[in-house]
Image (cartoon, rainbow, N blue to C red):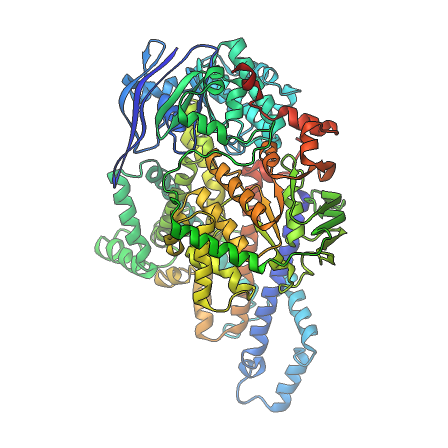
Amino acid sequence: MLVVENLTVEFPGRHGVFTAVEGVSMTVAPGEIHGLVGESGAGKSTIGAAVIGLLQAPGRIAAGSLRLGETDLRALTPAEAHRIRGKRISMIFQDPQTSLNPLMTIEDQLIETILAHEDIGGAAARARALDLLGEIGIENAAARIGAYPHQFSGGMRQRVVIALALCTNPELIIADEPTTALDVAVQSQVLALLRRLADTRGIGFILITHDIGVIAEITDRVTVLRGGRVMEAGATAQVLGAPTHPYTRALMAAVPRIDRKLERFLLPAVEGDLPETPEAADEAEYAANWLLSGLRHADSGPVLEISGLSVRFKGTRTSLFHAPEPFAALSDIALTVQPGSVLGVVGESGSGKSTLARAIVGLVNPAAGAMRFAGEGLPYGRARARSHPVRRAIQMVFQDPYSSLNSRHRIGEILAEPLKLYGIERDPAQRRRIAGAMLALVGLAPDAIDRYPHQFSGGQRQRIAVARALLARPSFLICDEPTSALDVSIQAQVLNLLKDLQARFGLTILFISHNLAVVRQMADNIVVLKSGRIVEAGPSEAFFASPQHPYSVELLSLTPSLALLDGAA
Amino acid sequence: MAYFILKRLIQSVFVMLAVAFLAFALFRFVGDPISQMTGVETTLADQERLREDLGLNDPFLVQFARFTGKMLVGDFGFSYRTRQPIGEMLLSRIPATLELGTVALLISLIVGIPAGVYTALRPRGAATQAILISTLVGVSIPTFVIGIFLIFLFGVKLGWLPTFGRGGTVQFGWWRSSLFTVDGWRALVLPALTLGVYQLTLTMRLVRAEMMEVMRTDFIRFATARGLPMRALHYRHALGNTMIPVITIIGLQFGGVIAFSIVTESVFQWPGMGLLFLESIRFVDIPVMGVYLVVIAFFFVLINLVVDLLYLAIDPRLRVKEAA
C-alpha cells in the first residue's frame, strides 16, 4: 500500500546541508504494523513527517519516491497533499496532553475533522464520532463526548487522539511514539488497541518508537535505523530474534532485560566518547582515590530508616463551604536501606515515587512519620537547617539532564560548587583539579571543564550530574528516573557508570524508576508503590522471580518483554 | 466558580483599601490642609476651630475610617481650587476619558489582532517585514509627537478635523457623550488615533509572538495532520489559544490607557480625567489628586476582574473540574 523507495531528506542550514534520512526504502501493507526503531537522531520521525508531508521547514525531500496506492505523494500540490492528510494518511503524536486543542470539546474536534473530509451533515458525523469512541474503548461515550480534553486521563486522551486519527477512515496511520508518555498498564491497552485496529479495519501503521519492547510486542515488520540509514529490516521476530547487523545486536544488548540481571551492558560504540588513554586513567584514578579517602564508612546500622512517613498536599478548593480534601501523596511508608545496597523504588506515575525522594532530601514537608539517617533523626523539610550535614551526605540526580544543570555556568563551576559549598576543598586550584579528575572518572574528556551544558548530549549531561553529586562525597545517592530521558545505548552507559561507582565505592543508592527492567539491573531490594502506599517490598531477585502482590504481578506482566523473541529465535 | 469570584472580590477589597490609604496619606501629610484652605487673614483661633470642626485632631485611624466611609457613600470631599464637590467634577470628566480610551482600544484591537495574525502566518513575507518595521517606528515615537504631528497634518495643513475639545456632545443623564454626533466623532478621531497607535503596535506584536508559538504546538500539528481546512486551523484552533495570554495584556493596557491618557488629553485639550489631573497638579489640589488615584485604582481592579471572568469564559480548564 505505502511504498517508500530511496527516500532522502535534507535540511539545508547555515553550515551546509544536513542529511537526516538517506536512501531509506520500506513498504507497509494493509493491516500491517511496521515498526521504525532507532535512537534519537536516527531519522524515524523525519520519515513519518515526509510521508504525511509535514516536514519542518527548511527540510525537503531530496530524492526517492513515496507512493500511497496509486498516488505519487511527491507529485501532489500543497492543496492536494493537505486533502490527503486525515483522509488517507493520519497521524498520532507522542504526548496526548498536548495534542488536543484544550479549548474545544472532543465532540467539536471529532465532528469538525469528519466534516472536513466528508459532507455527511452534523448528525451523521456525531453518530460516527459516538460509535468510534465506543469502539476504541471509551465507556459511556454519549455522556463523555461533550467533555474537554483536560477532563480525561492520559490513557483516555490518547484514545481520543486515536479516535481523531481514525474518524476519517484513513488507510495509513503514522504513530509517532504513541505510548512513550504513558504508564505501562495504559501502554499495553493502547498497543492492543492499535493491533486490533490493524487486524479488524485493515489499517496500515507506521509505528515509530525508541522502545524495542514495544516493537517486539506488536509489530509485524521492523526497520532499524541509525543516523538516517537503514541498518536492518525484515520480519520482527527474525530481526530481533536473530539480528545480523552488529548495530542491531548492540542495540538489543543495551536494552535492560526484565527477565534477567546483567552485570554490565555491552555498548555500541558512540561517537565523541573518550578513548581510554593512560592520562585519562590516571585522572580517573586520582578522582577515585579522592573519593575513597573521603568516604567515612558508617557504622554497621542502616543508612536510612523511614517509618510511618506520610505526605499530604492541599487539594484544590472548589467550594466555598467545604475545605478541600487533602491529597495523600504518601501514606505510612516504612523502609530501610542498608549501607552499600541499592533500593529500587517502582510504581506508575502518581504513585508517590518522586515525593518520597523529595521528602528524604527535605524538599517537601511530611505530615507525619520518622526518618533516621545513619542513626540520627532527620528533621523535616523546612526544619532542616541549610547547614545540616545531611544536606551534603544525601545527593540527588534528577531525571531531566537538560534542566538540572545551570545553563549559564561552565561545567567547571558546576562541579566545583559542591566542593566550595560544603567546605570540602578551600583552594580554588585544587577544586578545579578534583573537578577535572571527576570528569575523567565519569568518562568525559578533560576539555569539558570549560564548556557549557548545552554543548553536551543528554547522556553526557547526566554523567556530569552524577559527577556533581559525587563531588559532595555523599554517603547516599538518590537517582530519580536518571535514565528515563535517555536513549537505550546512553541509558546503558549511565547504568554501567552507576554500577561501577556503586561496586567500587560501596555507594548506597535509592533508585527510582517506572521502568521495571531498568530497576532490575540496579537494585538489590525493591519497593513497589501504588497510590502512595507500599504494596510489596523485598529482595529484588526474589521479587522478579515470584512477585507476591497482585499489583506487582500485573505490573510485571504488562511490561513489554523480549523473552518472546528468545523462544522464536 | 462562585468561590473563585468571591476570592477575587476579597482581594480587590484589600487592594482598594491600600490605595485609599495612600490617597488619604497624600491628603493628610502632604502640606497642611488648613493652611491651604485658609488665607493669611484667618486668625489662629479660627484655624484651630476649623481644624477641630473638620476632625483633623482626631486619631489617625479614626480619620482614615471616616475618609474611607465617606468615599463609600460617594462623598469625595471638595476641591481646593474650584470649591466644587470632587465627585461631581470627576463624574463630568469620566465619560470623556472612557469614550476616548474605549475607541482607542477598539482601534488597537481591530487593526492589531488581524495584523498580528497576518504577520504570524506569513513570517517571511514582504508585507510582514514592512508592517514590523513601521510598527517599530510607531513604538519608538513618543505619544505627544504623534499627537502634534496628527494635529499639524489633519488640523492645520489639511484642515479636515478639529484639534481640540470634544465637539458636539449629547447628554444622557449625567453622561455626556460625543459618540452620537458627526461633530463629536470628528473631534474624537485624532486623540483616539494618537492613543491607539502605541497600543496597536503592542497588541500586534504580542498576538504575533503568541500565535507563532501556538502554531508550533503539537495540537496544531495534529490538526494539520488531520487535514482540517486552513481557515479552521488558524482562526478556530490557533487564534483561540493565542488570545488567552493576550487578554491579560490588553486588559492591563486598557487600564493604562485610562490612567495615562494625560499626555494625549493635554495635547488635544480633551476635557477628561487626565486633563483634570494635570490642572490639579498645577494648583496643588491634593484632594482631587487623591480621589483620582482611588478612581484609577478602581478601574484597574474592575478590569482585572473582567479579565478573570473572560478567562473563565474562554478556558474550560479553569472552570470547576468535573470528575473525569
Q: Quadrant of residue A519?
A: top right
Q: Image height check: is A342 above or below A542?
A: below
Q: What residue do we see at 43% from left, 64% from top? A: B275
- Furthest-left residue in view? B157
Residue A170 place in picture, x, y as percent: 45, 14
Q: Residue at the front extreme?
A: A278
Q: Is residue A106 above or below residue A29?
A: below
> Along the line of sight, which residue is nearer the eye, A561 or B227?
A561
State the residue at coordinates (65%, 79%): B56
| Frontmost residue, B296 versus A5 | A5
Q: In this rendering, is residue B60 above or below A473?
A: below
Evaluate whether residue B38 shows in this view.
yes
Q: Residue A325, can we see it?
A: no
**In the image, is B315 to the left or to the right of B212?**
right
Residue A313 coordinates in the image, percent (x, y): 69, 47
Looking at the picture, how far across and down is residue A357, in whole percent?
Answer: 64, 47
How many marks the image carries: the answer is 0
Q: Residue at x 74, y 27 (%)?
A: A550
Quadrant of the snapshot with the N terminus of chain A: top left
Query: x%, y% of residue A486?
Result: 48, 38
Task: Identify the image quadrant of residue A343.
Answer: top right
